[in-house]
Amino acid sequence: MANAILLEVMNNAFRSIAEQMSAAMIRSSYSTIVKEMRDCSSSIFDRDGRLLAEGANIPIHLNCLGPALNTVLTKFFPKETLSPGDLIVTNHPYAGGASLGSHHTKDLIMVAPIFFRGLELVGFSVTMLHHRDIGGTWTGDSWTVEIWQEGLLLEPVKLFEKGKRNEAVWNIILNNTRVPRDMKGDLLAQVSGCQMGIQGFNDLVEKYGLLVVQETVEELLDYSERLTRKAIEGIPDGVYTHEELLLDDGYKGGPYRLKVAARVEGSDITLDFTGTDPQVRGPINSPLSATISAAYYTMRGLTDPSIPTNQGCQRPIRVVAPEGTLVNCTMPNGCFQRMVTAHVLVDLIIGALGNAIPRKVMADSCGCLYDFCSAVNMETHPRGGEVGHRQYWGEIVPGGLGARPGKDGISVMSCHVTNCPVPPVEAQEIEAPVLFLERSLLSDSGGAGQYRGGLAQRRQWKVLGHEAQFFHTSQKSKVPPQGMAGGMPGKPGKWIVNEGTEKEHVLEYAMGDVTFLDYGDTVTCVTPGGGGYGDPLDRDLTALRKDLKGGYLSSEEAREQYGVVFEPKGDLDEEATEERRRILREQRRRETAEERSAGAVPVR
């Protein structure tokens, strides 16, 4: 039995290897989406395909790598067929017949077996990287209806065999992208990440011995399982249900409904999505691997953060996702924008368990938000771009995160299963014909509460190129991020083209297909703010003063939502505020009692 010190040393060693794998990809990649937004992930697995550690990267990627590795090993390349120097690549969501592969075609997964001293299989080094373009109808994230519109499909195939590159596969990939230079650089970066994992794992085994490493792995997985079960035991037994909407603004036949029943029995939890709407002819369907990812992420966030993240954390969690629904799509339905569903799945599970553990959950966040645009301009970027000198820009657009017990929501951050940094404006302007005009916090956008929701942002850019193709995806433009435990919703978001001009128009839907823009057109994105937590009338007056001074909150919002009374000179009148709050609380208690007697049930 390994002692506690060795257990901790080995846990941090595995984590360090995974982090170095990610660092290698980020520092050697070509595309902005990786080198600036860090849209890549890495994990280390043992010889049985069990997760040992992961880099702190994209949550929706990380929990997908285990199911994808299992698909590779059981459906395509059994362990006995692998050799040192092999490297397998795949991006097929439906590889092996079920939706347990990659999440979408741009996310390429690489699997490299780890052989100690070139003789014995001891583990797997696995990376996932979001590539800028893999073919398909458009380079952006448009509304597709079938998987073949979403680009090149690669069932698991050896890109390297015994150390030798398969030039045929290599050329197929590079000939099915609009950006072969970026693709080549990012593929090599991903290979480097896998090699870093192989080297790190072998160094660890060389230092401690294979037997010690294998014994410690067993104890480490059991340790994480015990602590996770202990955390689940803290949730009262019962069945907790919740519903959430997708495409709440009616786009493409929406809204669509997601349902969950969270069954807690001792130290086990089942997340049952039975009752969720059927899959649609569109790209928002979630492969089962993505649904599992969102479920594991949410439960990981509700348990002790000090627990080592490995396969042991997943053992007490069971996911039931009926085939042919929005949470377990089937061939040939599109799934390019599965993140729309994945983000709502997080709010869905939290909404259900909030009934049982209200002090451990958070209010709704901004959801899935991103935009991508490309244009041609030989004057400003004569050496940029590749096909027709077309250059690309865009980002995972952050908004407000939901508030938590004891904490305000974080402002302007990519939430939950995304976790991408905001790319520098300068980096995008250097690489593409775009001029950023504004990036600012939006006052009053966070949901009111004892703890305020995170603020949204206003972001505006101008096209400095021709033949511009703009794609946008966002959520919560009609039904805003909901508050929790008496907190108020955050403000919804919107997209505006040519704001303040005669050509101004608000885009009708939160997401859509390609929009063609002219030289000089502007796009303004207003993201949703996070929901608030707790009664706004209980917010600390010192915190309100800081909000007012910092411009996070206007005096009008302070009066309306927080019951603030101001002195003639504009200072906060504490005595009058407390009296007004007392009156408002009494008024709300009467209104709530009337609603209950009438049979009305408040939402969350």
Image (cartoon, helix red, strand yellow):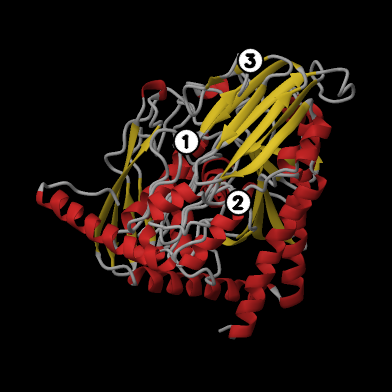
Q: What residue is disc 2 on?
A: 79
Q: CA distance from mark 2 to mark 3?
A: 49 Å
Coordinates of residue 328 in the picture (x, y in percent):
40, 38
Q: What kind of element bears circle 2?
A: helix
Question: What residue is drawn where x is 41% and y is 49%?
Answer: 347
Residue 585 x/y as whole percent: 27, 60
Graded by Cα atoms within 10 Å as few (under 14), some (14 to 19) or many (20 or more), the crowding at tag 3 reads some
Nearer to us in this view, 517 or 35: 517
Circle 2 Cα neighbour tier, 10 Å, few/some/many (<14 / 14–19 / ≥20): some
Circle 2 or circle 3, nearest the eye: 3
SS label for mark 3: strand
Q: Quadrant of residue 198?
A: bottom right
Q: Amino acid at mark 2?
A: Lys
Q: Position of residue 192 (x, y in %)?
A: 79, 49
Residue mark closest to the camera, 1 vs 2: 1
Please, what secondary structure does the residue beneath circle 1 have? loop
Q: Upstream in the sequence, badge 2 or badge 3?
A: 2
Q: Which residue is mark 3?
A: 516
| Residue 283 horizontal side relative to residue 439, left or right | left
Q: Using the image as rendered, state which of residue 382 and residue 552 is in the foreground.
A: 552
Give the residue at x 24% y 49%.
Answer: 602
Closer to the chain start, of discs 1 and 2, is 2
Q: Which residue matches tag 1?
A: 475
Q: Answer whether labels 2 and 3 touch (C-beta < 8 Å).
A: no
Residue 86 location (% of width, % of height): 72, 46
Earlier residue among tags 1 and 3:
1
Near-viewer residue (153 or 392)? 392
